[in-house]
């Protein structure tokens, strides 16, 4: 059984004026953004200007809840954080990629004047192809010599694979260049127009693909608001270890803890590493704040034939001589890759949240996608910079937004007390639903939730259409942790625990209409 991690938010309007009365009532609804924008400018006795709301809000929030079934525990010991300004706006926005100015700033900051290029042409020359064919023929001969009654079946599979590779290379041979298969085409930071067909329709985008001789690369893809692909900027640099963003194998730390817990081989202090990461954000010309620092472990992967190290995918060599592992087909069939994490933390991972005219934007580590096949993919903006022993080794910047207009400069908002009532009414229903969905006849799932801070922020809600267009609306965002425990009744099965990466939104309440904003669906 697989732990269910999809947020179990159902689908109906919950208005503050009339709290949902039963678990059967739907909790989350698609937002009519035009109606929401209209409501923001209307007088409403339940909503007050931010300046007045700030005077009434408490500094902290505490609460605890346990359901009778013992499957859900929720507690809050949280700081209540409000914008420094006395007004909070509403904006209309789109997500269609990065501006040329942003890309140029990031490019100049990362490559520091180094020449960059892209590779065009064949993946190999005729000479390289000849060498591969000779190697494969040697493999065929060695396999034929090694064949016996014990390994006949596995050798037959390997010989067929090898012969297919020979046939494929032979067919490709005449089209290959004599030498220098890959041609370096100099490029700079300029985004280029690209068009292609998707589902019978022409799709246009702008993109940049480049690398340097320092073993680093930058890829930028700007997608249209109606494209099925999301806009993305990604930078990678070769280092001692490899890393995966959102792997969950890290520890969230305070600045005071960072230097104490990072590995001794890290040449950068926390402040030095942060300065590198902050510099990239500044180079992009974007106002953002650091919201999460995570210490992560890099890993090495042993699988390459040249490594001389293998992890057998089977209990033995299936009757074959281990010497045959020098051939790639044999190694691929009989071995599997092994990720070997470093003993100590080897890098700082910084996550940022956009700030719009002094007001922070809600941020989440969630990478869960909508299960609605009619809904366009639109993740919340995510800005992650990883600093290792080589400096900035990774940058992942997903779904940047562009503000088109200000809908209202000063939106009246619901009080913290109103948002608290929504949270305490609906959070138990949501997490009881998740626990129930994750349980079956073979196991029971429990949910443990802790709220550590509550922020009045801007949060994106998307239009009820097929484009990445929507609004930044004021929202009371309850941040914290969520841990799902799955206990199996069969003692031979090992229990599972899954903790969501932070920053994690436990629940977000739209401060204009009192509805819940779903961080998976985006409305």
Image: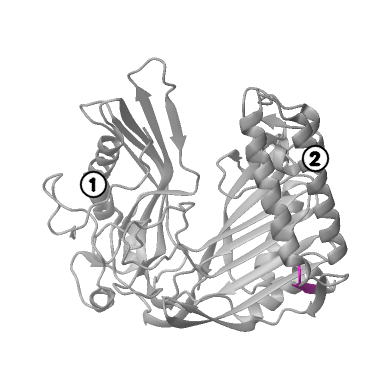
- The image shows residue 226 at horizontal and vertical percentages of 41, 77
The front one of 361 and 79 is 361
Res 174 quadrant in image: bottom right
- The majority secondary structure of the magenta stretch comes to strand
Secondary structure beneath dot 1 equals helix
The one nearer the camera, 309 or 479, is 309
Colour approach in the figure: one colour
Instruction: Please say if 523 is above or below 266.
Output: below
Residue furthest to the top in view is 491
Residue 426: assigned label: 1
Give how far across and how far down residue 350 sits, in percent. 63, 53
Task: State the image coordinates of residue 182 (x, y, percent, origin top left).
Answer: 81, 70
Magenta highlight range:
117-122
At 60% from the left edge and 50% from the top edge, which residue is drawn?
A: 245
- Queried whether the magenta region covers residue 119, the answer comes back as yes
Q: Which residue is mark 2?
A: 141
**In this view, 204 is above or below 144:** below
- Please indicate whether residue 269 sits to the left or right of residue 400 in the image: right
Q: Secondary structure at mark 2?
A: helix
Out of 397 and 291, give the one closest to the viewer.
Answer: 397
The residue positioned 32% from the left and 19% from the top of the image is: 489
Residue 441 is inside the magenta segment: no
* Residue 116 seen in the figure: yes
Residue 335 in sight from this viewpoint: no
Q: Eyeballing the image, is 167 above or below 42? A: above
**Quadrant of the snapshot with the C terminus:** bottom left
Kindly identify the residue that appears in the image at 82 percent across and 74 percent down. Answer: 183
Disc tally is 2
* Structural crowding at the residue carrying mark 2, measured as other residues with C-alpha within 10 Å and reported as few (<14), some (14–19) or many (≥20): few
């Amino acid at each position: 059984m697989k732990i269910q991690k999809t947020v179990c938010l159902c689908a109906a309007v919950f208005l503050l004026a009339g709290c949902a009365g039963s678990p059967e009532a739907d909790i989350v609804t698609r937002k009519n953004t035009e109606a929401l924008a209209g409501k923001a400018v209307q007088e409403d006795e339940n909503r007050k200007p931010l300046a007045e709301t700030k005077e009434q809000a408490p500094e902290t929030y505490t609460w605890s809840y346990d359901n009778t079934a013992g499957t859900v525990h929720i507690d809050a010991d949280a700081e209540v954080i409000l914008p420094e300004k006395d007004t909070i706006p509403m904006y209309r926005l789109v997500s269609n990629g990065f501006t040329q100015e942003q890309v140029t700033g990031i490019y100049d900051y990362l490559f520091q004047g180094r020449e960059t290029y892209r590779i065009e042409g064949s993946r190999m020359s005729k000479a390289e192809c000849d060498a591969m064919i000779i190697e494969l023929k040697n493999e065929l001969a060695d396999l034929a010599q090694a064949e016996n009654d014990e390994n006949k079946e596995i050798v037959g599979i390997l010989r067929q694979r090898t012969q297919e590779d020979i046939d494929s290379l032979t067919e490709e041979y005449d089209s290959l260049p004599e030498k220098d298969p890959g041609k370096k085409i100099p490029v700079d930071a300029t985004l280029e127009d690209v068009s292609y067909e998707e589902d019978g329709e022409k799709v246009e985008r702008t993109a940049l693909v480049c690398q340097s001789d320092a073993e680093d690369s930058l890829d930028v893809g700007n997608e249209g608001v109606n494209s099925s692909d999301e806009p993305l900027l990604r930078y990678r640099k070769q280092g001692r270890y490899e890393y995966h963003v959102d792997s969950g194998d890290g520890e969230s730390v305070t600045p005071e803890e960072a230097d104490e817990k990072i590995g001794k081989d890290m040449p950068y202090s926390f402040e030095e590493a942060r300065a590198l990461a902050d510099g990239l954000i500044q180079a992009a010309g974007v106002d953002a704040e650091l919201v999460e620092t995570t210490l992560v472990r890099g890993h090495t992967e042993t699988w390459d034939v040249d490594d001389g190290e293998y992890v057998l995918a089977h209990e033995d060599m299936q009757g074959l001589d281990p010497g045959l592992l020098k051939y790639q087909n044999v190694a691929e069939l009989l071995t599997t890759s092994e990720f070997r994490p470093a003993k100590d933390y080897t890098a700082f991972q910084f996550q940022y949240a956009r700030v719009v005219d002094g007001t922070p934007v809600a941020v989440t580590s969630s990478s869960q996608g909508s299960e609605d096949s009619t809904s366009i993919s639109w993740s919340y903006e995510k800005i992650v910079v990883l600093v290792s022993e080589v400096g900035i080794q990774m940058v992942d910047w997903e779904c940047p937004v562009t503000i088109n207009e200000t809908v209202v400069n000063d939106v009246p908002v619901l009080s913290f007390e109103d948002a608290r009532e929504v949270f305490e009414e609906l959070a138990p229903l949501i997490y009881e639903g998740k626990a129930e969905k994750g349980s079956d006849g073979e196991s029971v799932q429990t949910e443990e939730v802790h709220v550590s801070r509550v922020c009045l922020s801007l949060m994106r809600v998307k239009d009820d259409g097929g484009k990445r267009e929507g609004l930044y609306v004021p929202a009371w965002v309850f941040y914290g942790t969520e841990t799902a425990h799955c206990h199996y009744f069969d003692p031979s099965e090992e229990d599972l625990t899954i903790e969501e990466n932070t920053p994690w939104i436990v629940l977000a309440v739209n401060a204009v209409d009192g509805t819940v904003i779903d961080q998976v669906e985006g409305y």
